[in-house]
Amino acid sequence: MARPEKTAKVEALRERFLSHEVVFLADFTGLKAQEINDLRFNLREMGAELRVLKNTLTLLAIKDTEYEAMGELLVGPIAAAFVSGDPMAVAKEMVAFSRANPAFALKGGFMEGKLLKAADMRSLATLPPREVLLAKVAGSFKAPLYGLCGVLSGPYRKLVYALRAVADAKSEAA
């Protein structure tokens, strides 16, 4: 029979997983406590919470949830970043941290109902920020409208130029 404190930990961990749509996992073997704390502080500023997980309790917590596929990544010491903010910014920070600290190995994660591998996290980190993507979308909506406006105003503009040429010709003749 499970002890009540472990059952409470499993339920709290299940709630944490279910309340976050994006979770990134990494192996932190060989890192110093200060390095992990620096990463934890940086991720907290981006809207993510870095937690060290116990694999057995985590497997129990994600059982019968959409996160169950993450069970294959839970090998060795695992740190999980539970993302509430921009997932791309968190992925960029974790990838940059793994480049600076080779002992920090990305494992993968879970985003929008899909299991991510470490390569997927790296490709996610190469995407431009959300604001840039939104600006590109807005620009792509705006460009055809400006083109249409130019095309529709062309005949009127030509008429104004013709009338001005006629007026100039009459003023020179007088």
Image (tube, rainbow, N blue to C red):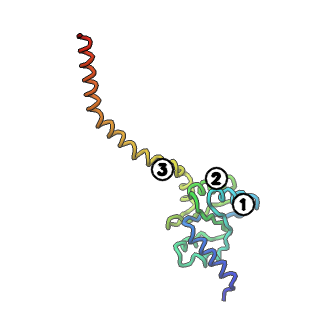
Q: Residue at x 51, y 47 (%)?
A: 132
Element carrying mark 2? helix
Give the amino acid at mark 1.
Answer: Ile
Label 2: how many Cα within 10 Å (few below 14, some 14–19, many 20+):
few
Quarter of the image for the C terminus: give it: top left
Task: Give the mark toward the camera: 1 or 3.
Answer: 3
- Quadrant location of the N terminus in the rendered image: bottom right
| Left or right of 37, for residue 92 | left
Q: Is the residue 93 above or below the residue 111 in the image?
A: above
Q: CA distance from mark 1 to mark 3?
A: 33 Å
Q: Residue furthest bottom?
A: 1
Does residue 84 appear in the picture of this structure? yes
138 sits left or right of 91 in the view: left
- Which residue is pictured at 44% across the width and 47% down the height? 138
Q: Compared with residue 170, is residue 133 higher up or lower down, i.e. above or below? A: below
- Which residue appears at 65% of the width and 77% of the height? 57
Dot 3 alpha-carbon crowd within 10 angstroms: few under 14, some 14 to 19, many 20 or more: few
Residue 135 is left or right of residue 73, and the answer is left
Q: Earlier in the sequence, mark 1 or mark 3?
A: 1
Label 1: few (<14), some (14–19) or many (≥20) C-alpha neighbours in 10 Å: some
Residue at the front extreme?
Answer: 174
**Tag 3 residue:** 134
Dot 3 or dot 2, earlier in sequence: 2
Residue under circle 2? 96
Vertical comparison of 128 with 30: above or below? above
Three-letter code for the amino acid on which mark 3 is drawn: Leu
* Residue at disc 1, secondary structure: helix
Q: Is residue 146 rendered to the left or right of residue 169?
A: right
